[in-house]
Structures are given as structure tokens and as C-alpha cells.
Amino acid sequence: MPELARLLAGERAPGVYWWPVAPGAEKLRVEAEDAGWRFVELDTTMVVDKAGLLDAIATTFGFPAYFGRTFDALADCLSDVRDEIGVLVLWEGWAALAELNPQTAGLALEVFGERAAEKRWGPFAVLVAGLGPELDIPTFE
């Protein structure tokens, strides 16, 4: 896992990465927490539409009840997801959504990417794990 070690050490920029052969969540959790990062596991295996995706994200991150279930509201709430050392999100089960609703998956990746690019809220990285349709994001190896 040299790429993960580089990310957690600050030697690779936080961002959104596709990791087709990612190890299991527990192994990543241990690596992240050992480096002082907050680990978040987002599983959207049963999600096939925007409403389901936004509900899963809201539940996973513990967003407030007034979360508006829009991508703008997602961007706003992600600005509150902070950790001084960093936040590492493992997104599993994304393939069905990307296959059935590529626009929704693409918008989610865009919003995650915008949050990752915002340095004032601390490092934020999303690893999109597993095989599925081709993604237009850098690959993590």
C-alpha cells in the first residue's frame, strides 16, 4: 500500500481516486487511524439513484436532519467534515449507481473533489474502491 502510505503522510495530494483493487475496509481503517486520520466507510451497494445516494451519504456522515438532499447541500455539509490530520473516505458499492445513473455518480465525485481541493478544512480524500465502469478520476495503485 505505498500509495496509501504516501497519501496519509502528506506526500500525495488529497483528492478523489479510483482504487480498483483496494484492500478491505478494516485494513484501510487501521492504516488511516494509525496515521491519525479519521476513517469513513461509505457503502452504496444498494443505491441506484440520487435520493438513495444522498441519503446514504447523509447517514454515513451524520448530517443534520435539515440536510436538503441536493448536491449543493452536500457541498455545504461536507465543508463541516473536518479533521486536523485528515479524513479518508472509502466509497464501496458505487458500481451499480455509476452504471445505472452515471450523471449522479459523476456529480458526487465532483462534489467530493471540490471538498478535497479545499485545503482550509483539512485534508480530505475519497478512495472509490472496486471494479466498475471506467471513471474519469486518477487511479490509485
Image (spheres, grey):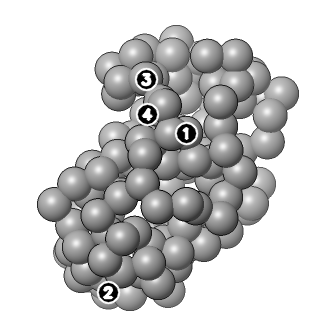
Outermost residue toward the left in this view: 46
How many marks the image carries: the answer is 4
* Image quadrant occupied by the C terminus: top right
Instruction: Quote the CA–CA distance across marks 2 and 4.
Output: 24 Å
Left or right: residue 62 versus residue 139 is left
Residue tagged by mark 2?
68
Is 140 above or below relative to 95?
Answer: above
Which residue is found at the position 47% from the left and 84% from the top? 103
Whether 141 is drawn above or below 125: the answer is: above
- 17 or 136: nearer the viewer: 136
Q: Residue at x 55, y 60 (%)?
A: 134
Q: Is residue 6 above or below residue 135?
A: above
Kindly indicate whether the residue at mark 4 contacts the one at mark 1 (C-beta within 8 angstroms).
no
Residue 67 in view (yes/no): no
The residues tagged by marks 2 and 3 sit, at their Cα atoms, a distance apart of 33 Å
Q: Position of residue 33 (x, y in %)?
A: 48, 19
Which disc, if any, is residue 23? Answer: 3
Q: Mark 3 near mark 1, Cβ–Cβ under 8 Å?
A: no
Residue 24: x percent and y percent? Answer: 35, 24
Q: What label does residue 39 carry, if any? A: 4
